[in-house]
Image: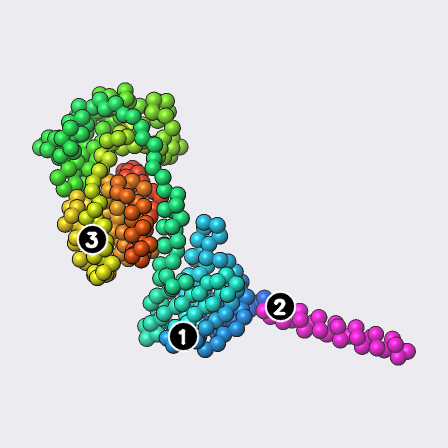
Amino acid sequence: MTKKRIIILVSAIVVFVAILILRNILISKRTKEFNSLDDFTTPKDVIEYMEGIYIKETESIEEDFYLDIYATLKVDLYTGETRNEEYYRTTVRIMANTLKYKNFRIIDDEKKNLISVICDEENSKISRTYINGDDSYFATRDSEIKSEKMQNVAITEFEIEATELNNLINKNWNKTAINTTNANEFNDYLYLDNGIAVRNVYKKVFNILFRSNYSSNVLNGIKSNTSLEDVVKILGKPTFGSIEENLIGYKGTDVYAFFTGREISIYRVEDYETDELIEILKKFQDDGDVKKFVSSITDMWPDYEEYAYGEEFVNLIYSLRGIKIQFNITPSHGLIIGSNYAGNKEELKELKEKLGIKEIYFENLDFVYEKELARVNNAKG
């Protein structure tokens, strides 16, 4: 065998061996199994399991943190307007367990994102996660997106025909406008023999139902059992819901009207002053006292339809006003503004930006429609 052939053969063997080694490394990496959180032993394990690119880890340059992990994560915080919260939540959860719940940071220079995680090492749990300095990043960003999309809904012209509804409107929805002396009560509603049911909240009627046995026209020649197709022919394209969902709705100057083909559900359009709300928000910004904040709201508006609270949560809802005050109920901790809020939304946005009140969030959703949708679904069982 010539010297040249020997060299070629040796070179081929070297290449072959290198390929085998690389193949074994790849197979080993690919077949490494993670069946529980305890199978992760290094930050590199976590990043690569989450399909990111691990770069390095160093002792944190921040005094209160144990480790800085540099990586390029698989996805950004948002893809378009779709949040990737679950990806980030999972990454943080696995990393925290791997580091035995020491404080850490994940630094993604490519996406310009900084995730700072504060843990309770003694109790092995995550206390706070800050993304780019915000501990409710996704709720804040969602609020910004929804705020930009908020727009006033079309107003439908209603010709009110039901005597009971005209009386309610003329008497400013005072609950004494409807005689409920002999009514049967069920699920917050008082049911009358004439086919009407009402829900009272504080001193006013919150909602009135015209049920299938109410025989007169309610509005615009429409009865309780008028088909949804015929309602659309009379009132036009629904503002809320659809025929396919078996619920359609419209908003007028004075009332909302929702139809199911079996009953008509009416809510009032609430008009109210919001100057005092602004002042309460400013005080809350100064002292951060949630209890005082909520108490001031209920003193101002005692007509909430839902109010539940405990040591660590608050759930206060004014659907007709387009307002929710929620702490530790959803990621949006604070004042949540619906699209049917009657006050000046731009004033709230300006207040949020100028005073840095992060506890103001916006939902591109009419809370009255949300309430009616929940009522109909509950009735279905």
- Within 10 angstroms of label 3, few (less than 14), some, or many (20 or more) residues? some
Q: Earlier in the sequence, mark 2 or mark 1?
A: 2
Circles 2 and 1 in contact, beta carbons < 8 Å: no
Callout 3: helix, strand or loop? helix
Residue placed at 49% from the left, 52% from the top?
A: 79
Q: Which residue is mark 3?
A: 280
Question: Label 2 is placed on what type of residue?
Answer: Ile
Is residue 150 among the parts visible in the rendering? yes
C-beta proximity under 8 Å, tags 3 and 2: no
Mark 1: amino acid: Glu
- Packing grade of label 1 (10 A; few <14, some 14-19, many >=20) is few
Between the residue at mark 2 and the residue at mark 1, the CA separation in whole angstroms equals: 38 Å
Q: Earlier in the sequence, mark 1 or mark 3?
A: 1
Query: Would residue 25 appear left or right of 235 to someone viewing this image?
Result: right
Quarter of the image with the C terminus in it: top left
- Please state the extent of the stretch shown in magenta in the rendering: 1-29
Q: Residue 99: percent from the left, percent from the top?
A: 43, 74
- Is 191 left, or right, of 5 in this rendering? left
Residue 221 in the figure: left or right of residue 297? right
Q: Amino acid at mark 3?
A: Ile
Residue that numbered label 1 is attached to: 62
3 or 2: tag closer to the N-terminus? 2
The residue carrying mark 2 is: 27
Numbered label attached to residue 220:
none
Residue at point 52% right, 71% down? 44
Q: Position of residue 273 (x, y in %)?
A: 20, 42
Question: Residue at horizontal 39%, vertical 73%?
Answer: 103
